[in-house]
Image (cartoon, rainbow, N blue to C red):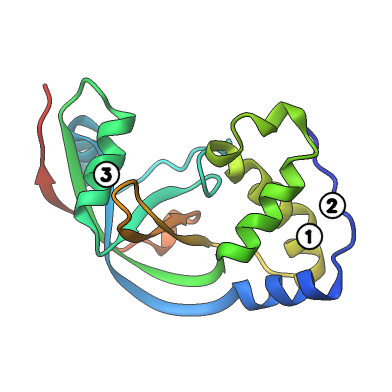
Amino acid sequence: MVELSFDRLNENNKQLVSEAIKQELGECKDLYHGTSSKNAREILATKNFKIPSKPSGYLGRGIYCYLHDVEACRIYAREHHKTERIAVISLTADSDNTFFVFKELYHFFRNLAQKHKEIKLVIDKRIGFIIESFIEKVIMPDYNININTIGRSYNLNDNRAVTMYSLRNKQMIKTPSLSLYWEGK
């Protein structure tokens, strides 16, 4: 595993991080999580999401959701469950201690990762590893806060703007419900 070290933040970067940490965003409705229909049935039966222990993806570990965008969820689920029937789960979450990775911060993380050739080739898909390390080594000690949600807005391939969240604490998720089933086996 690659070990990242973080130099002390300069004043501009401290300001970026401070602006990115939102203590309480309150109840977040219209979140959608795409997965296989098998996983969706298990989640709905147990009322329990499984949060991966290893950081991966664009926002590190957590339950990935899109805000107000069922189609983005369908695309995400299809990419991750290529041969299975897919489903979208609707949920509401109490979003407190949110770290919002806006464009300038994303570029900060990309630049940081450029120094590590092990990560460089897949930086866009592994940026979550860098965010996880940053939370653990900078935000928690320097800001004394445990991040429960990570958010990011970006454009999909069709140039449509979306907001993605990684919910890192399953206790903040309210009762999920099935929204839709889609194509596949």
* Residue 99 location (% of width, % of height): 58, 66
Which mark is on residue 147? none
* Residue 178 location (% of width, % of height): 14, 50
What type is the residue that disc 2 sits on?
Phe
Q: Which residue is mark 1?
A: 138
Q: Earlier in the sequence, mark 1 or mark 2?
A: 2
Judged left or right of residue 178, residue 55 is right
Q: Earlier in the sequence, mark 1 or mark 3?
A: 3
Query: Quick one: 130 or 154, which is closer to the camera?
Result: 154
Q: Which residue is mark 2?
A: 6
**Gap between marks 1 and 3 measured at Cα:** 31 Å
Label 2, residues with CA under 10 Å away: few <14, some 14-19, many ≥20: few
* Residue 106 location (% of width, % of height): 61, 57
Tell which tag, 1 or 2, sits nearer the viewer. 2
Q: Are marks 2 and 3 in contact (CB under 8 Å)?
A: no
Q: Which quadrant of the structure image shows residue 76?
A: top left
Q: Which residue is mark 3?
A: 34
Disc 2 secondary structure class: loop
What type is the residue that disc 3 sits on?
Gly
Q: Is 46 placed above or below 7 here? A: above
- Image quadrant for the N terminus? top right
View extreme (right): residue:
8
Picture residue at 34% right of the left edge, 46% below the top:
157
- Image quadrant for the C terminus? top left
Q: Which quadrant of the structure image shows residue 118?
A: top right
Disc 1 secondary structure class: helix
**Gap between marks 1 and 2 measured at Cα:** 8 Å
**Gap between marks 2 and 3 measured at Cα:** 34 Å
What type is the residue that disc 1 sits on?
Val
